Image (cartoon, coloured by chain):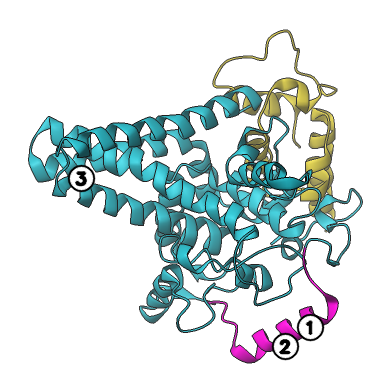
Chain colours: A yellow, B cyan
Amino acid sequence: MITVEEVTKLIHREMRGKAPTGIEIAEDTKLGDLGLSSLQVTEIVFTLEETHGVEFDPARAADARTLGDLIAIGNEALAAQDSA
Amino acid sequence: MDGRKHYGFILVSSLLPLFGVVAAMVLLWNSLAGPSDLVAFLVMFVIAGLGVSTGYHRLLAHRSFRTYRPIKIFFATAGAIAGQGPPLIWVAHHRRHHRVADKPGDPHSPYQEEQPGIRGALKGLWHSHLGWLFDPGLTSDPIRYCPDLARDRDLRVISRWFIPIVLAGIVLPGLIGFALTGTLFGFATGALWGGLVRFFVSNHITYAVNSIGHYFGRRRFDTPDESRNVAWLAIPSFGEAWHNNHHAFPRSASHGMRWWEVDVSALVISGLKSARLAWDVMEIDRERQERRADGLRKTGGGRQGRSAPPVPLAERKDAVVGVADVE
């Protein structure tokens, strides 16, 4: 199961310890508001893939707007893998 | 890098090498350039040139051949040294360029917002050469365009360490200069020639493939874009300038398609293949070339030409992006 805490940790790693100012990271946080570059979001998505041994649907992951969207795509893929 | 940092990087990485060229000219004028500088320049020019051409372009963006992990890491690092961007970003822009070449959405077409007259033409050429990199809205999402490469941890690491690798590419020729002369002055001029001057020359050659290579030159294939074969650019670009051939057969390991179309990068790949260090090399025989040329002649080419699918799958919200669709 991918959690908000886990993704928050990855976001902080990408930001090199500099927390995004004035934004509390939660499920409804928009990825665009975090000030992450496309490369940093890529790093987060594919690190999650590697840690959980799962493949995100790239087209859907690219369209994800909030943190929650992204986590849902990952967890759906995990669930599909478990039931298979 | 977010928008502002990106702008800053492009500004520094295009102006600093230019100042370097001016400084090098002054030194040259005063006979303060030696053989060690030439060696530093040539070694770094070849590393950066092959890194972009053989590595970023043919190995990563188009998967024209396969190779062992250390060789992949070498070419991807060499490509990063050239300073044109992290591999994942470079490839994302490039695959998008192919999907919509010279049509709306192409990150670096000289025909974007086409305006009449010589001024309009120059504006277009500037945009496709370097101007596009200053576009604040420029973004090609690696998740969408190169998930295959983003799944490779080596390429993510190289992308993350892009700037230190670029800087190492300036220190390295300094070390060559120091090794050959034993002086700090040799270090400084080595870094100048092999670092900054090389950075300038080699990047403007790549940019010229995007600008001149879509404007002036011959077209063997009526591809649905304006790509051109530019013979005089072939050798310094390591074969990249056979750009019309490349748009007709993006995955081909060789962009040169006749014996006289010199393609250094293709020679490197076939050398690797002979040494059994590369396999699954994409080779296009003459018959297939002729068939494609005939087919394209019937449909008609140029930027008004039809391209299939009309809207690239990669740009459509409802479509699943396959790797084959974006390369």
Where in the figure is residue B96, as x and y percent of width and height? 72, 52
In the displayed image of the protein, which residue is found farthest to the left? Answer: B182
Residue tagged 2: B291
At x 45%, y 34%, the residue is: B163
B189 relative to B80 in the view: left or right: left
Hey, which quadrant is residue B289 in on the image? bottom right
State which region is magenta: B280-302
Q: Contact (CB < 8 A) between labels 2 and 1?
A: yes
Same-chain status of marks 2 and 3: yes
How far, Cα to Cα, is label 2 from label 3? 48 Å
| Figure check: B235 above or below B49 | below
The amino acid type found where label 3 is placed reads Asp
In the displayed image of the protein, which residue is found farthest to the right? Answer: B318
The amino acid type found where label 2 is placed reads Arg
Which of marks 3 and 1 precedes in the sequence? 3
Which of marks 3 and 2 precedes in the sequence? 3
Numbered badge on residue B295: 1
Where in the figure is residue B4, as x and y percent of width and height? 62, 22
Question: What's the chain of the residue with tag 2?
Answer: B
Check disc 1 and report its element: helix, strand or loop.
helix
Residue tagged 3: B37
Where in the figure is residue B42, as x and y percent of width and height? 28, 54
Question: What's the chain of the residue with tag 1?
Answer: B
| Figure check: B244 above or below B128 | below
How far, Cα to Cα, is label 1 from label 3? 50 Å
Q: Is residue B177 inside the magenta stretch?
A: no
Where in the figure is residue B22, as x and y percent of width and height? 33, 33
Hey, which quadrant is residue B217 in on the image? bottom right
